[in-house]
Image (cartoon, grey):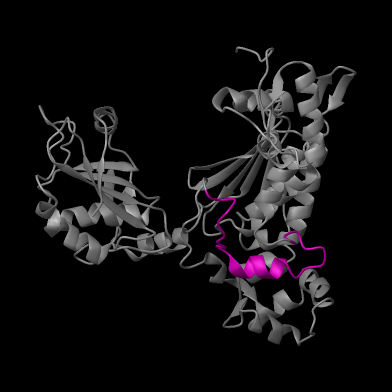
Amino acid sequence: MQISDITKAEADEILARSESHFFDFKSKRIAPAKLSRALSALGNAEGGEIYVGIEDSSVIGQRWDGFPIPEDANAIIAVLQDLFPNGETYSYSFLKCSGYPGLVLSCEVFKNQFIWKDTQGDIYLRRGAQSLKQDTFEKQERLRLNKGISSYEDSKVDMTISELSSSDAFTAFYEVIVPRAEPNAWLRKQKVIRDDQATVAGLILFSDEPQAVLPKAAIKISRYRTSDEPTRATLEGQPSTIEGCAVVLIKDAVDKIVETVERIPVMKDSGLKSVQYPRNAIHEIITNAIIHRDYSVNDDVHVRIFDNRIEIYSPGPLPAHVTVENILDERFARNQKIVRLTNKFPDAPNKDVGEGLNTAFEAMRELQLKDPVVVQINNGVLVTLKHEKLAEPEQAIISYLRDNDEVNNSKARAVTFIGSENKVKNIFRKMMTAGILERIPGRSQAKTGYTKGPNFPDA
């Protein structure tokens, strides 16, 4: 196993951390079975780190008390490698610091889509700084839903197949089905019917009013006349409730949000103007909120419109291995049937399956607005669109050169979010004329680079 040398400053930084939802200390004397509970808990939650060989903060004196030699950790490692193998989910290494005694076993756990058991076959879940046993069917089913192993979209609801197949929403959809099939047979084939009852997926997609059966499947839109935290005093009128099947819900919600936003005035050089957000950014985030939400969570999608931002909250945590850090690159559909069948509608709201959030980021950048902010909060996902301008291209290039020796066209396009090489070339010319940049001499055109000029700002 790898042994990594770290500095005393790095070791002290580890020791200064507090045990939390993502972080734990364990003594080198811990029983492998007890350690397996903690690793099961982290693996079943959002991941985290455990350092074995560090006493907790209540211990007086030397806390870093590692294994004298790697072989002394063999009993622990044997259990870990058997239950939690080294790979894409679990990673192990020893940490060595010349200022502290022994080797600390570092166990890193990444968010994943599996359920992990301890040495006794029990399932634990990390909550705060605790490992909580998931010892009931309800707790384990909630874990499976959060992981995306099972989906609430397959649950039956109080609607018969004949009620669903005769709805206006399904009738309109049925007209464009290719190849055509008998309605009830088609619904059964698509697995949105179980025992002649509609499933949540069938209800959300094809019922004229899903909220009559599943009340918390609507979108609530609230307008607050403030840029600060919302209060009852700053709430404008009553929140709007948008209902209907998924496709109608998305279209009507986007229309309502855009209409509301366009009434928000902002001061420009030429006077008061309407706030502008890219419609397709709003559309993509609302689409994601509807088709990827967890319908087992008893809550609506909430949209809060402020003077300087839009917040869109979707019930249910990010599923499986998806995190706020990798959300633009990873793909995992909690509601696979809803996602797939929504894409079959005429003018489907999710035309480019899996690209919705990327499209929202690109749309914000085209208007020179800051990227959407994605956070996981209160058992849901909150996306915030801020009405804040990106730094001017020149300022973004200057900031880059404060930390780097040179910049080229490719790097400048990355930091300014400008797609055109020629636009960046024109910016470079202006900055050279002003003495802010200098072209690096002696390079071919293909390797052109720029560095700080005599008038480069000091701060």
**At which x and y percent is residue 150?**
47, 68
In this rendering, position of residue 57 left or right of residue 117: left
For residue 18, which quarter of the picture?
Answer: top left
Question: Which residue occupies 83% across, 31% down?
Answer: 263
**Viewer-proximal residue among 311 and 80:** 80
**At which x and y percent is residue 177?**
79, 78
In the rendered image, the quadrant that contains the C terminus is top right
**At which x and y percent is residue 373?**
60, 38
223 w.r.t. 67: above or below: above
Q: Residue furthest front?
A: 442
Q: Is residue 329 magenta?
A: yes
176 w.r.t. 200: above or below: below
Q: Which residues are magenta?
A: 326-351
**Viewer-proximal residue among 152 and 164:** 152
Question: Which residue occupies 12% across, 36% down?
Answer: 101
For residue 23, which quarter of the picture?
Answer: top left
Q: Is residue 157 magenta?
A: no
**At which x and y percent is residue 187?**
68, 80
